[in-house]
Amino acid sequence: MEGTEKAIHRIAVLSDTHGLLRPEVTDILKTCEAILHGGDIGSRSLLEELERIAPVYAVRGNIDKEWAEGMAEELEITLFGLRIYMVHNKKHRRENTDGIGLFIYGHSHKYEEKKEGEMHLLNPGSCGPRRFWQPVTMAVLEVRGETGDWKTVKIEWDGREGAGKGPESPAEGNLKGTVEKILREMKAGQKVDVIADRLGAEREFVEQVCRVYVTHPGVDAQGIVDKMEVSALFEHRQH
């Protein structure tokens, strides 16, 4: 057996779970020695479930409200010799990142890897509810014990299988039907939070449907779907 100094240490990196921990994600986490979460965890129970698997280092995201009060909004740690800095939205990063080897963030739900000087930047994307065309993604860091060298392994699923329980992404079901239900609730005077809870949909998606409806008088459910998908596709092409 190899000595500890020659081991390859595995660190799971995920973000934007929004209350959904997929079984296939759990299987990956069980092979890792630590879990890094870039925020928008979604619930205390999900965080506790992660903590039962491995030590968790997490930052608070914009949807992590009362239950996450007191949780750090940014975090710096060193694991297996790798100095890591974390914040949910990269726009909120601190100015001085000297000596940081890896900067981890989330928020956009889009996987991203790039380099800025000597610092590597990593957004693991979202492994929570699937949105539109976007795949379900996370990453695993593999750190070599004897050298400290490390690499990132991107892990991706199409998001249609093994979704488990949690807020429904409309792309996993009938998008037009979900929009029609949201419009009925909205016309009945219900607030966004209430609609999201009743339909088991993401608040952000409900809010977007309501915004399109208000700004485009007379638009029907299919029209809203078309506008949202065109907007999402345009944003995707800009990144």
Image: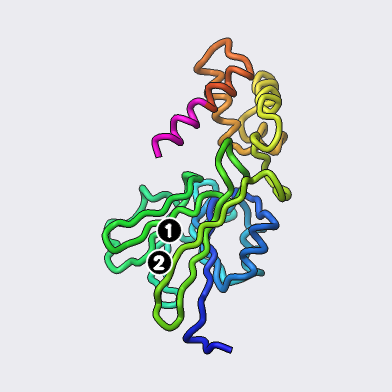
Quarter of the C terminus within the rendering: top left
Q: Which residue is depicted at the point 62% across and 70% down?
A: 31
Region rendered in magenta: 230-239
Q: Which residue is depicted at the point 42% across and 56% down?
A: 122
Residue 140 among those drawn in magenta = no
Residue 66 visible within the image: no
Residue 64 placement (x, y as % from top left): 55, 50
Q: Please report whichever mark, 1 or 2, sits nearer to the chain's N-terminal start.
A: 2
For mark 2, what is the residue? 84
| Up/down of 175 relative to 105, above or below | above
Q: Which residue is depicted at the point 46% across and 73% down?
A: 143
For mark 1, what is the residue? 104
Are the residues at dot 1 and dot 2 in contact (C-beta closer than 8 Å)? yes
Residue 233 among those drawn in magenta = yes
Q: How is the image coloured?
A: rainbow
Residue 16 visible within the image: yes
Mark 1 lies on a secondary structure that is: strand
| Up/down of 126 relative to 153, above or below | above
